[in-house]
Image (cartoon, rainbow, N blue to C red):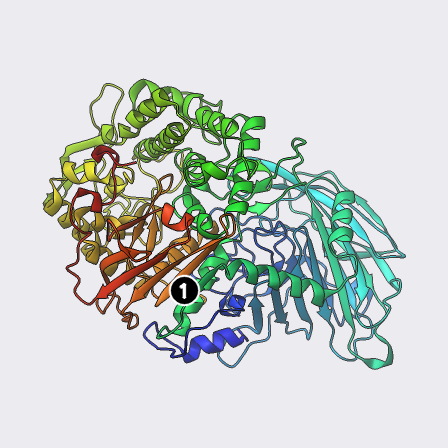
Amino acid sequence: MRTVSLLITVLSASLASVKTQAPILITDPASFVLPFIGTTNGGHVFPGATLPHGMVKVGMDTDSPGNQAGYDANSTFNATGFSQLHDTGTGGAISLSNFKLWAFPNCTSFEDCPTSLESRKALRKVLPDGSPDDFASPGYFSTNLSTGIRVELTSTRRTAIHRYTFPEGTAQPRMVVDITNDGPRTSTNPVMTLDPTTARVIGGAQFAASFGPGRYTAFTCVDFAGEGFELGQPTEFGTWLGNFPVQGQTDIDQLYFGFIDELGALFTFPPAPDGTPTVILARAGVSFISSEQACANAEEEIPDFDFNRVQTENRATWNELLGRVQVDTTNVSTETIQLFYSAIYRTHISPADYTGENPRWNSTEPYYDSYYCNWDTYRTLYSFMALHDPVTFSRIVRGMIDIQKHEGWLPECRGATVMQFIQGGSNGDPILGEFFVKFSDQAAALNVSADDLYTALLADAELQPPNWNLQGRQADAWKQFNYIPQDMFDAGGANTKQVSRTLEHAFGDFAISQVAKILGKTDDAAKYSQRANNSFNVWNPDVSVPGTPSVAGMMQPRFKNGTFNFTDPRHCSIHDPEMATCFLNAANRDGFYESSPIYSQYVPHDTAQLLRLQGGKDSFVSRLDFIFNQSYFDVTDEPSMQIPFMYHYANLPGKSTQKSRQVIAESFNTSVSGLPGNDDSGAMASYTAFYLAGLYPLPATRQILLSSPFFPSISFFNPLYNSTTTIKANGFEGNPADGTGGKVFVQNVTVNGELYKSNCFLDWDVFVNGSVVELALTDDPNVTCGSGDEALPPSLSTGGY
């Protein structure tokens, strides 16, 4: 990648490399963002141009097999086009990648242009280090193709603008608009019309959802202009079908299903005068309503075809958002700073703001999409957003509530306006709980109705949908048995993931209990607090890890009659003799989703009770050590996220600090393969950001677990409260490369000069009031949470919350 930031990364090759400078305010945090992190090795990160939560995500598509976000940083793969819509960090099939544009500098004739995707594709130019000649920064992407074409991209919320610079001497610059080729090539019923005078192209098609059974319709409106000269009307125009351009044809309207077809528009434009390189701008509006609305979006957002203005404003938007989080960079490696701001950046790519683009009902409420999926993001993404972007958080919550009003249940996994498959529980519940527990005093000011929010939560908790593969819960069984039985077959959905769903429904009910408590609904608060204890209804004390009888007691599948089935605790781990995966599969009835039975560690609202069930402090710590030492900890997937911080509950925060820092040192870096797995719509990004900040969230509570940041100080500005909270790591000396030692352990904590009640967590009030938190650091890992029971992080069974 030809970027200044990646050059810096090469010069600063490890987390131990030290940058020494006086503390300064970071005025251009976008300069520390490396969008190419995680664009190979299964990270599936989108590196193209978008605004924070922008609907349009314009970027390059390649012909690599793992291009869920369109792009692959491996230079051996060809570019196939530059499309307007993408997701980021997802698993499943390739999603979106709609309405590709392409430029031809040297077709021998109009009819000879190789318009099909396979025929037109081209390699990128390659740099001496073997990487492609691509560049990206927030709101901007560029590449130099082997054809001599230079492509630059930027965007507004619903519109992209492309800049194509043709090689000097190009006599007949040509542009392709591809209506049909989405990422998985699923289009049906395409329509397209081109204007031979203005070269405007309008059109659309139906496409398949990438992680579910639905189909969606999308539309585009593409216009062209010259940069630095008047482009004029095209000298040749026509449609193309497959690899066959038809000059003079202006309309296509096809009905087909069950096979792949390709079609679009092709134009030849006059070159720039006086032999200067021809630069053609392409403006692509997008809509899920109609082509007319796509045109209106484009004309409203980019009326002047001013690429530089759009790029400048886009970057300024990113800088304002990223700049709400400030760090002191003294004795911190450049790579650590880049890793941190890149993680915050990726936290704000999804979900996407589709407000005004909902084809399913009319509403004045915000509409967000690309929840892909809440199962991934509820654990960390929204909690990080709460620290510095509560207004966007509130709009997302309003949009989720509006979906519940019209579809009956909160969204769980959703893409391109259609429901997709649920991964685990009804995980919109803790997202709404997180918002209301943190911001109930500001809900009205943020236009969030407390009544509507609570009604939406109760719909998930109490009403069984017709298809709980796509929305809601298997609520009837949940209420009848207080767990999800393994032998509960009914017509409402697949009989899978019973243990995982039990644990996640219990946490969802905990979140509901906290909302009920704030609203003064005492009976409901007690009811849902009791249902939060359902986690332990699938605890079987008689199961142990084969060969390790000391690790005894596991969550296990349970039948309707109350007896337990057996799932090998090694199942779906690297030690599984069967090498199972536990991915989404209707025939997979082992009880767990994307985790081994080590998901037994997931009771975040009552870890104290889990500690007791596992034999007390020493046995609990021994089990955590076993999970790490025997590689049951899976850094690639969300069920393991909280495990490094669980030592806090055994009053051993030094071990939490060591383990969380080891996770960063061993598994995250700023390279194109710098993520251990899918970024999962920003889930891994927000997880990384929290760890680097020395924090870990407890969603739907007013507590955040505390360690030490990777910086001498870190500040969060919250515009809702107009307050800044600063955490100072007094005695900070840097970040040892292996993450195991150094002066990084928290010996005591003061807030605004007063000794704080705990060294292991901060109450949300600290962030509301704009506090100065000071951590006294030591190199002795044998620190504690402090004296007294209140120093330990709260749990439901100990009277917390």
Q: In this view, does 572 lie above or below 537?
A: below
The residue identified by callout 1 is 674
Classify the position of the C terminus by image quarter: top left
Q: Element at badge 1?
A: loop
Return the residue nearer the eye: 204 or 779.
Answer: 779
Give the residue drawn at x 44%, y 39%.
Answer: 431
Q: Specify the amino acid type for callout 1.
A: Gly
Give the residue drawn at x 21%, y 35%.
Answer: 798
| Number of marks in picture | 1
Would you identify the image quadrant in which residue 601 lies? top left
Which percent across, then down, holds residue 180?
Answer: 69, 49
Would you identify the image quadrant in which residue 747 lies? bottom left
**Residue 752 in sight in this render:** yes
Return the residue nearer the eye: 652 or 165.
Answer: 652
Would you identify the image quadrant in which residue 354 lies? top right
Give the residue drawn at x 57%, y 74%.
Answer: 133
Q: In this view, does 277 lie above or below 471?
A: below
Looking at the image, the residue that sits furthest to the front is 753
> Would you say 103 lies left or right of 326 here?
right
> Would you say 326 lies left or right of 636 here?
right
Give the residue drawn at x 14%, y 59%.
Answer: 782
